[in-house]
Amino acid sequence: MKKLLEVVFAVVIIALIGCYLMLDAGDGVSAQGKAGAQSQNASQSAVPETLPEKSADISPDIPISSDVESLDVEPQAADEHQAVSEKTPPPAENDRTQEPVKSIFSELRKDAATMQLASPGAVDSFEARTYANDVSGTGYYPMTGDFSISGGFPETAQYESYGENPVKQVSRDPLSTFSLDVNTTSYANTRRFLNEGRLPDPDAVRVEELVNYFPAMDQDMAPRHVEGSPFDVAYELAPCPWNEDNTLLWMTMTAKGVDFSEAPRANLVFLVDVSGSMSPPERLPLVQSALKMLSQQMRPDDMISLVTYAGSTAVALEATPGRERGKITAAIDSLGAGGSTAGAAGLTLAYEQARRAYIKGGVNRILLCTDGDFNVGVSDSETLESMIEREREGGVTLSILGFGTDNYNDAMMTKISNVGNGNYSYVDSMSEARKVLNEEMTSTLVTVAKDVKAQIEFNPANVMEYRQIGYEKRILRDEDFNNDAIDAGDVGAGRRVTILYELTPAGGKPSVDPLRYQASPEPVSRDDFTPTEMKSDEVAWLKFRWKEPDGVKSSMAETPIMKTESAKSFSDAGTGLRFSAAVAAYGQKLRNGSHLSDTTWSQIEAWADASRGSDPYRAEFVQLVKLAGSLSGGNKPAEK
């Protein structure tokens, strides 16, 4: 409801400004008519023949939609506002050509405060910029390209809160069960926040998606193949950098690689949101560039379809062989934004197209490009999930590329991507599109293991407590591990998944006091265990299940996590563990996590910088840590 009020409010204000300016122009025509001038000449004299180059014509064809937040009314600092005002002072009190607009801003302040849509400072900034744009001296205010209210009105992006994993006692809860997650959405979205000069919404930060963003480096610990599985596993233990009394367990699972030229044929349906909210340059125009780049890499026998949705749906391109690149490019270039967002209807039509061109044994996938703002038809996540799950069982999977800022519906896309057996990535730039759709194309499109679950049993002889870092949205019940009916994450070819735990060693300081009435208190010595329980230096036992891409029954593999793979100090650990620790610390701190309340941004920066190697993505991360530290107020501890 509030979002609707925002849209109506902004539309009314824009309309009133237009009406007042038209009336003002009419008064000029009438005055000159009384002097005997021709009506046409009077009109021409009232309106300047040309507008400044920065001006953007306001056309009735431009949709005004839920993306009205793209009007640039950003709160400015007092000195910045004063500088704008001094450069272009408001018009004199007796200048009647300005009175209608001045009146509108007066009403805008009242309504903004009443409806809690914008701060008075945001309106002040808007007014100052409007006067600054009156370069012709006629009382007309051309709206420039940076006209947006992203800073003044509250962001309408939607994020789900998944909380934070608690510390668990091994004696009471020795099993940790979860689904693997290959999404990297949170990293790119968090980067976008920081590059805009603001800290992210804590719920937009999901630590596992940050850690899994980075490809492996040659300097990282080499994984070992787990017999009978499509995975290689690496692990290492080291003192935890933010709490040296504890131990950090770092594990990676890397799926077998596949050369795209040898991968099964692909049947891709590009499902593109062309509603009004997708009109800004970081949305539909970026989508078009990304899809053209992807289509250029498809093989001659791969099939590509293009479906669009806004207030209605349409097939912009029937299934077309990849060799017909010109036809595919022309269809993508023809897209334009406008209207509401009938997302469910678009999905239904896309699935129809996917079934028509279905390739048995191939990659049959819908690639949904949207800001997630489904506002027409079926828009509740449960109904959408049911439809996507049915289609998934029929062999058509769903991947999502998220675009946009202020009305970005991450909560919706996270939920439906979890059941779509595909990937979910956020694209904030062409560079990110290149990473997802070019450098990682095979892992994005080709699944080598589906419904992948992991279960770790900790050995109480070596571990007293554990806390999993991240994966809150992927936690499963222990009994779900052996239940093949329970859906889990899919892993693409060559994809590496990183898993982190903070462990309290046996004999260490527990986070929970010993219980008074329990018959068997928490053991603190290896002497409390039988030889069988401590038959080796096992810290934990890793089991994982997966299904073949077209399979219905899971297979299982297992491997021990040995205490012998331990570094004496954090600085002695491998680059993989140290860099992952820095990224995990960055994520927890952005979430205001209680476990890093005494850790500073400069410490995190040092950990990352010492382990980044030559990887450009890791180098970029170091800069993001610096930026987050600046926006957070430097090296003060995180707020508790």
Image (cartoon, rainbow, N blue to C red):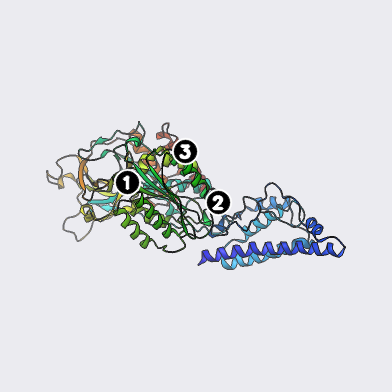
Q: Which amino acid does label 3 sit on?
A: Glu
| Relative image position of residue 302 (x, y in whole percent) | 37, 41
Residue at label 1? Answer: 359
Q: What element carries label 2?
A: loop
Of the two numbered discs 2 and 3 on the same chain, state the one appearing first in sequence: 2
Q: Mark 2 or mark 3, which is nearer to you?
A: 2
Task: Name the residue at 40% across, 52% down.
Answer: 593
Task: Check disc 3 and report the residue beneath it.
Answer: 620
- Disc marking residue 599: none
To which residue does mark 2 refer?
280
Label 3's element? helix
Q: Quadrant of residue 211?
A: top left
Q: Which of 187 and 386 is in front in this view?
A: 386
Disc 2/disc 1 C-alpha distance (Å) = 35 Å
Instruction: Pick the residue in front: 411 or 392.
Output: 392
Residue at 74 percent across and 50 percent down: it is 50
Whole-angstrom CA distance, mark 3 to mark 1, is 40 Å
Which one is closest to the eye, mark 3 or mark 1? 1
Q: Mark yes or no: residue 597 visible.
A: no
Q: Quadrant of the C terminus?
A: bottom left
Amino acid type assigned to the residue bearing label 1 in the image = Ile
Which residue type does callout 2 highlight?
Pro
